[in-house]
Image (spheres, grey):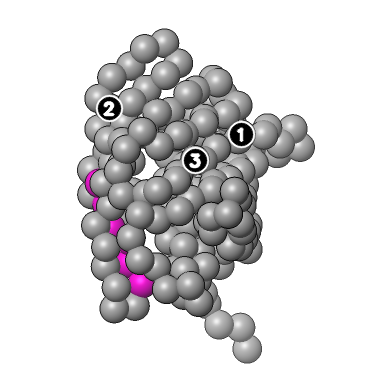
Amino acid sequence: MLCAVPATALAQAIRLDKLKVEVKRIEVDGQRMYEVDASGSVQAPPASVWKTLTTYERMHEFVPDLSSCRVLSRNGNEIIIEQQGMARFLFMNHPIHLVVRATETPFTAIDIALISGDMRHYESRWNLYPIPETGGTRIVFSSRLMPGFYVPGMLGTTMIRGDIERMMAAVLARIDSQHAEKAG
């Protein structure tokens, strides 16, 4: 006998299958930090993905634990963004405030560098790769970060992996739902 799987559960299962997240502790110049590599695919073309990723002012609407995201300035392909959110793991909640510089290479990459905030080190990059066979896009997020607050060594990797998985799943879901609305 077959069991009916709710559409949302099925979509979530497919999304988790498409989503890959790796987090490891590394040492750079004598300092321990976390290195993140995450990727997933969506049916939307790179231009649609780009629009979602660069509409910074709306990120807090769908990214978990991000309470606000606002553009402070724009100068060509360089955008200064202020973000506020929360790092959560089990019983720990830590507010995070960042000011970052995003450098856009339209439809292919966004480089993000820390200007100030609750991290000792933060850099990340979003890469978009067209998938010619499907017309979709492979989205790759990579980052190196060092929180400016205490993170238990044994739990840090798990905590950051959970945060990145939630963030990536939300981004992929938002892009897929927007693409489905346009296609439907």
**99 displayed left or right of 133:** left
Q: Which residue is nearer to you in this view: 70 or 146?
A: 146
Q: Earlier in the sequence, mark 2 or mark 3?
A: 2
Q: Name the residue beneath numbered marker 3.
A: 123
Between marks 1 and 3 in the image, the one whose residue lies nearer the viewer:
3
Q: Is residue 36 magenta?
A: no
CA distance separating discs 2 and 3: 18 Å
Amino acid type of the residue that numbered disc 3 sits on in the rendered structure: Glu
Q: Identify the amino acid type marked 1.
A: Leu
The single residue placed furthest to the top in the displayed view is 76
Q: Position of residue 81 (x, y in %)?
A: 31, 31
- Identified by mark 2, the residue type is Val
Q: Give the mark toward the camera: 2 or 1.
A: 2
Q: Residue at x 51, y 64 (%)?
A: 161
Question: Disc 1 designates what residue?
Answer: 128
Q: Which residues are magenta?
A: 84-89
> How far from the left and from the top, in percent, is residue 62?
33, 48
Mark 1: secondary structure: strand
Residue at x-position 36% and y-position 12%: 75
Check contact, mark 2 vs mark 1: CB within 8 A: no
Does label 2 or label 1 sit earlier along the sequence? 2
| Helix, strand or loop for disc 2 | strand
Badge 3 element: strand
Residue 28 horizontal side relative to residue 92, left or right? right
Q: Give the Cα distance between marks 1 and 3.
A: 17 Å
